[in-house]
Amino acid sequence: MTDAGKLNVLLIGCPDTVVRAVSEGGHEAWSSSLEQPVDGPVLPKGIDVIMVDLTVSGPDPFSRVARTIGLNSFHRKPMVVGLAETTNAALDTQCRFAGIDLLFLKPIPPAQVTQFLDRFNTVVQDFESFDPMI
């Protein structure tokens, strides 16, 4: 979490409308394409949320999520949100194995992104205020 109590959000292959919604909501947005390596100094100290567009063509978004979670291992596991156009049992299984916690169906209204992040931020702040060692 950033110093101001806002979330660090890594957006992988997400539409510009989602990236703007995160930034305009006051959160720290880190945007990346699926092809772009994300590691080391590029990442903030702790990613709170990863949002990945599962419909973008290119490298496997599921393995990308798993690698990114591994890079963030010094911090708590981020909430991982996938964006998809439809859902089915096979996609649900892939999401579960990749560590994706939540699936939003596209197109996702920017206000819904902001509301989700604000609610999640409240939960994280309450949790961190309970145990300052987190």
Image: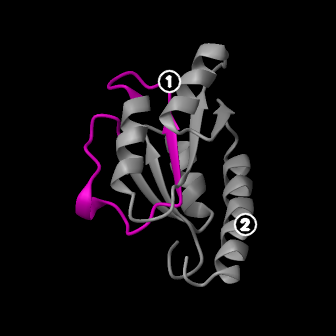
Residue that appears at 69% across and 60% down: 120
The residue that disc 1 covers is: 55
For the record, the magenta segment spans 33-61
Residue that appears at 28% across and 34% down: 35
The residue that disc 2 covers is: 123
Q: Quadrant of residue 132?
A: bottom right
Q: Residue 40, how many percent across, how many down?
A: 25, 59
The numbered dot on residue 81 is none
* SS category of the residue bearing label 1: loop
Left or right of 57? Residue 93 is: right
Q: Earlier in the sequence, mark 2 or mark 1?
A: 1
Q: Crowdedness of circle 1 by 10 Å Cα count: few (<14), some, many (20+)?
A: some
Left or right of 60? Residue 53 is: right
Q: Residue 89, how many percent across, how many down?
A: 66, 15
Whether the magenta-drawn stretch holds residue 83 is answered as no
Main secondary-structure element of the magenta-colored stretch: loop
The one of 78 and 119 positioned closer to us in this rendering: 78
Q: Amino acid at mark 2?
A: Val
In the rendered image, the quadrant that contains the C terminus is bottom right
Residue that appears at 24% across and 64% down: 41
Residue that appears at 59% across and 42% down: 81
Q: Residue 25, how many percent across, how many down?
A: 63, 63
Vertically, is 128 above or below 32?
A: below
Vertically, is 6 above or below 89?
A: below
Q: Amino acid at mark 1?
A: Thr
Q: Residue 105, how many percent across, how many down?
A: 68, 29
* SS category of the residue bearing label 2: helix
Vertically, is 67 above or below 7?
A: above
